[in-house]
Amino acid sequence: MNKIKNFTDLIAWQKGHVLVLSLYRITHSFPKEEVYGLTSQIRRAAVSVTSNIAEGFSRKTKKEKVQFYYISLGSLTELHNQFFIARDLKYITPNEFIDVENKIIELLKIINSLVRSILS
């Protein structure tokens, strides 16, 4: 097993990064009137997920690390909600929604596992 030396070595960050990139591609096709609305909120929440994973990684105490990973979970849940809105407004296809939702759920589980490993 390779030692984790950088936040980019974390599976949570790697999966989150893939999610961010896919969300940027998906939101590119959102209506222009959403540029400062849903598009911006989705992108900010997605970036927040990986940014808080990165920041949590650099913290020294368990308490601080977990705090940032919990913020990441909050941003991920916010993102999940925003994708329900995008789906219901028909900005995305049902298949896009399912794909994104699966990635979000997988990442929620991974981050929760990361928190549990720190607290145990």
Image (tube, rainbow, N blue to C red):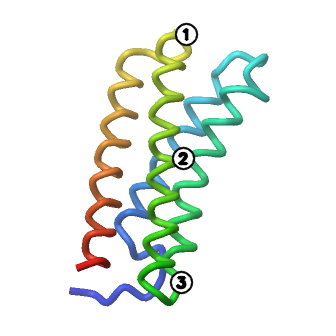
Query: Which amino acid, by three-letter code, is at mark 2?
Result: Leu
* Residue 1 percent location from the top left of the image: 20, 86
- Residue drawn at x 60%, y 54% is 48
* Residue 81 percent location from the top left of the image: 48, 30
Q: Tell me which label, 2 or 1, sits earlier in the chain.
A: 2
Q: Is residue 113 above or below residue 36?
A: below
* Disc 3, SS: loop
Left or right, residue 103 beside residue 52: left
* Disc 1, SS: loop
Mark carried by residue 59: 3
Residue hosting label 2: 21
Counting other residues with Cα less than 10 Å from the Cα at mark 3, is it few (<14), some (14-19), or many (20 or more)? some
Residue hosting label 1: 89
Query: Which amino acid, by three-letter code, is at mark 3?
Result: Arg
Q: In this view, does 74 lie above or below 95?
A: below
Q: Tell me which label, 3 or 1, sits earlier in the chain.
A: 3
Left or right, residue 29 beside residue 84: right
Counting other residues with Cα less than 10 Å from the Cα at mark 2, is it few (<14), some (14-19), or many (20 or more)? few
Marks 2/3 in contact by CB < 8 Å: the verdict is no
Question: Gap in Å between the C-alphas at discs 2 and 3?
Answer: 25 Å
Q: In this view, does 33 lie above or below 109?
A: above
- Residue drawn at x 59%, y 45% is 45
Q: Tell me which label, 2 or 3, sits earlier in the chain.
A: 2
Q: In this view, does 88 lie above or below 44?
A: above
Camera-side mark, 3 or 1: 3
* Residue 65 percent location from the top left of the image: 47, 76
- Residue drawn at x 33%, y 69% is 115
Camera-side mark, 2 or 3: 3
Marks 3/1 in contact by CB < 8 Å: the verdict is no
Query: Which amino acid, by three-letter code, is at mark 1?
Result: Leu
* Disc 2, SS: helix
Question: Gap in Å between the C-alphas at discs 3 and 1?
Answer: 39 Å
